[in-house]
Amino acid sequence: MTHTAVVAAPVAEVYRLVADVTLWPVVFGPTVHVEHLHRTSRDERFQLWALVGGQVRTWVSRRELDPDRHRITFRQERSHAPIAAMAGAWSLRPDGAGRTEVVLDHVFSVTDPAELAAISAAVDRNSTEELAALRRFAELGPPLDELVDTFSDTVVLPGRLADLYDFINRGDLWPQRLPHVARVALTEDEPGIQHLEMDTVTADGATHTTRSIRVCAAPASIAYKQLVPPAMLLGHSGRWQFTERPDGVEVTATHTVAIDPAAAEGALGADDTLARARRYLRAALGGNGRATLDHAGRHAAAGTAASADS
């Protein structure tokens, strides 16, 4: 199957969006999380979680990157039924007028012929969505480094690793544990894959509803992607990481955001909009993360004290 699009942006900028898969959760709707297993400037191997036909699927892919020819080939190293094998390529060609022609090819086989139509439809839908998102993002205008921001907060907390991980994992208990969370609906039909809908209350009393998919790898990591990001954002993904240390548990909360320039200007004004948006988001999202970590630390410390008393 072949899908094409013409993007009104230079080929180098478009190539960068395709080449850096760590950006995909905030650029491409279907991509939930990416975990690199090997990475150089010319080749990489990663595990990817994505929505396929409404369900979260995961696979390991290898890619060969050719920045000189603006071409990236890929193949799934470990596919899952009903897909028997999947490979393809991204080919980018400048048209001489500051635009880029993008060609996305897929070659695949299935374990059951009866599944061919469904898999073809899923590949067609995801490819169409990805090319539309690529065009939308690349044509925004500002450089990528101004549109996308990644920031982290790291703290060392008392208590046991299992208790701290459990605090973040049990999002269904957050309305009782976190004062800024009013409601949570959490389902986990497949172990480690959570669907979370949450109402949070801001300092001015406003309520915001978010929906996320979370990829949980106990006890080290919980990655998430917001399916409906806040109005100022085109995409928001993040990750909680847990590491045991002699003096406690190191917990890092990381956010990656893709800013919508028009929405940011409407909310913050036209002067230095993207820089102000980055500062605002670091304060707002980072503040929520730090508050959650503070409550997690208190919860874990209380659990440790209760265990010691018993």
Image (cartoon, rainbow, N blue to C red):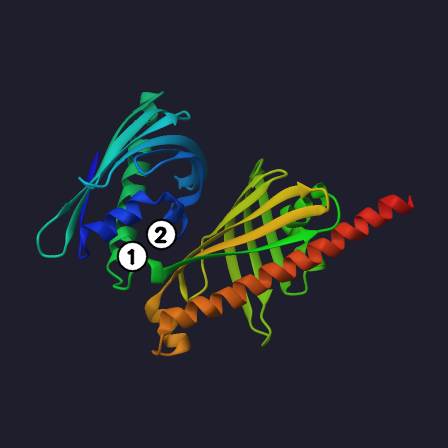
Q: Quadrant of residue 271?
A: bottom left
Kind of residue at badge 1: Phe
Q: Residue furthest left?
A: 96
For the residues bearing labels 1 and 2, Cβ distance under 8 angstroms: yes
In the visual, does 140 lie left or right of 55?
left
Residue at numbered disc 1: 137
Report the front residue among 123 and 68: 68
Report the front residue among 185 and 274: 274
Q: Residue at x 63, y 51 (%)?
A: 171
Residue at numbered disc 2: 27
Instruction: Tell me the SS state at disc 1.
Output: helix
Report the front residue among 185 and 248: 248
Label 1 neighbour load within 10 Å: few <14, some 14-19, many 20+: many
Residue 6 at what x, y percent from top left?
16, 51
Residue 55's tag is: none
Q: Residue furthest right?
A: 310
Residue 131 at what x, y percent from top left?
26, 48
**In the rendered structure, which disc, 1 or 2, sits on the residue that comes first in sequence?**
2
Q: Residue at x 61, y 56 (%)?
A: 184
Q: CA distance from mark 1 to mark 2?
A: 7 Å
Label 2 neighbour load within 10 Å: few <14, some 14-19, many 20+: many
Report the front residue among 130 and 250: 250
Residue 35 at what x, y percent from top left?
46, 38
- From the image, which quarter does the N terminus lie in? top left
In the visual, does 211 lie left or right of 28?
right
* Position of 16 relative to 36 (above/below): below
Q: Residue at x 75, y 56 (%)?
A: 298
Kind of residue at badge 2: Val
Count of residue discs:
2
Q: Residue at x 68, y 65 (%)?
A: 179
Residue 83 at what x, y percent from top left?
36, 26
